[in-house]
Amino acid sequence: MARSVREYKKLSIITPILISLEVVIECIIPFITATMVNEIKTGSDLNNILKYGVVLIIMAFLSLAFGGIAGFTSATAACGFAKNLRKDMFYSIQNYSFENIDKFLTSSLITRMTTDVSNVQNAYMMLIRTAIRSPLMLVFAFVMAFVMGGRMAWIFLVVVPILAIGLGIVIFKTFPLFKKVFKKYDALNKSIQENIKGMRVVKSFVREDYEQEKFEAAAQDVCEDFTKAERILALNGPLMQFCMYLVMVFVLSFGSYTIITSRGLDFDIGQFSAILTYNFMILSSLMMLSMVFVMITLAGESAKRIVEVLNEKSTLTNPEKPIYSIKDGSVSFENVSFKYSPKAKKMVLENINLEIKPGETIGIIGGTGSSKSSLIQLIPRLYDVSQGTVKVGGIDVRNYDLDTLRNQVAVVLQKNILFSGTIKENLRWGNKDATDEELVEACKLACADEFINQFPKGYDSYVEQGGANLSGGQKQRLCIARALLKKPKILILDDSTSAVDTKTDAKIRKALREYIPETTKIIIAQRTASVEDADRIIVMDKGIINGIGTHKELLAQNAIYKEIYYSQNKAGDHNEE
């Protein structure tokens, strides 16, 4: 994570230097005060005492200045470090392949980029400020206490081990609790995310009470673990107070006794006041150190979770000498087998052999779980094959530059995602330089223009996050228009017309044939009507190709296709035979 400090490195170095100067001055002030008290006791003149007063005022202002500037520099460095850390994590996630993303829950990634980074930010500020100040203050105050108090300062060697043992027990007890609580944070965020995302479903099934109970259980779980940790941490205060009062009782009683019996020869009032001040410095430093250890303990687990995200390397990388141009939209599967995880026992796709010509329209149909979507995800290299080769334009997809390949293979996935912004802004994801005329043309082809023009602001209408203010069919048509703006060599529609009526579906397919005849079109569908006019139809079943042919050929020869067709067309379908 140190790489994320970057431009805040200077401030991170300046802060400890300023803190060191502040500590030195603070430790000298009691010594000068004690000297001034002794001067007053011996009847020194006013001018001499005023000199001490002026020195103390200057030192107090210097201490304040160094401390104030250090506060500013540490806050700036810590906030900047957190900003860079979030940026690095976000950039790292953007480079993930689908396989990498599958390892992390969305809620977990959100927790890591918010709560975990905040914990590390607070710990970093403590490390460059308090973690420097407290040990220095402890050492200097110890030295000055021995200089001023002599053998009386040995009391600190009794108190410090008591505090150290107490602190060790606190850390030992709280660390496992903090480790557990972050996993429960993920569960809590997951509950919130699911509820908000599925609000319409929750309300339509009147499941608000169930969702409230689920959230309450997750929140209570987090609360209980934090309460246990806080109860243990609360012991720091009483332990600190006990040690402080123990030292005060000893210094007050033994110091007073020594001053009286020696008549100020062995131990005078100035030393007495200084030793009390150093007592507070030492014990407050120990208390702050205990808080630093607790914060670092908490942040340590957060840091591990952040490093997991930063260290996760994409399973898909560019070759050493990538190819930056694609000849045509031909697709070839040669003995392809695929599974989502190397640990998985069973292949999702097995021994796929397929040749698709440039400009050809291919339909893919099959039951749920037949691996239709898995097949097409290998073409733009969203996943890499486990065995065999997938070629586009006659070249293995692993030899292409990833951006080049994905710009020429436009995929409209099952889950249609739109982003908050205007319709124009969403469409320009396909082509950021597209003119308004090109946007309108693509929307007409996708049959989206008709509903866009009904909005008061037309193409400048605002789309809520995820397209929440649009219907399923409207979202699908906008996503198709967005893909068309890329003018790809291969266009893949993954069940992306399921929410539109058959008439609109037919109009979209007709427009695609006429507008982009040279583009290879691959259409995954549940309805046979969506693929009837395809050049060839592929029937998938349990990860293998069960049949390939035209609508008529499959209807005559393929049992699976025939069953799907007849189940969707019950009236007058036997005449087809």
Image (cartoon, rainbow, N blue to C red):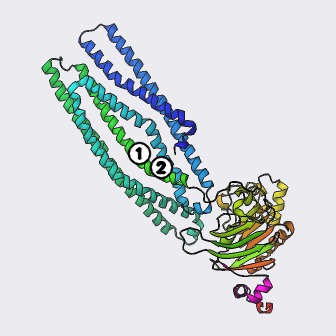
Q: Residues within 10 Å of mark 1 (few under 14, many from 20)?
A: some
Q: Position of residue 486 (x, y in %)?
A: 78, 59
Mark 1: which amino acid? Met
The residue lying at 37 percent from left, 34 percent from top is: 134
Residue 207 in the image: above or below residue 537: above
Q: Mark 2 or mark 1, which is nearer the start of the sequence?
A: 1
Element assignment for label 2: helix
Q: Residue 365: percent from the left, percent from the top? A: 71, 78
Residue at numbered disc 1: 295
- As drawn, is 357 to the left or to the right of 145? right
Question: Would you say residue 499 is visible in this rendering?
Answer: no
Residue 522 visible in the current orientation? yes
Q: Tell me if label 1 and label 2 are in contact, CB under 8 Å.
A: no
Residue 549 sits inside the magenta stretch: yes
Q: How many marks?
A: 2
Residue 303 badge:
2
Circle 2: residue type? Ala
Q: Does residue 527 appear to the left or right of 85 in the view shown?
A: right
Stretch of the chain drawn in magenta: 542-570
CA–CA distance in space, label 1 to label 2: 12 Å
Rendered-image quadrant of the C terminus? bottom right
Q: Residue at x 46, y 25 (%)?
A: 65
Q: Toward which corner of the image does residue 571 lie, by quadrant? A: bottom right
Q: Secondary structure at mark 1?
A: helix
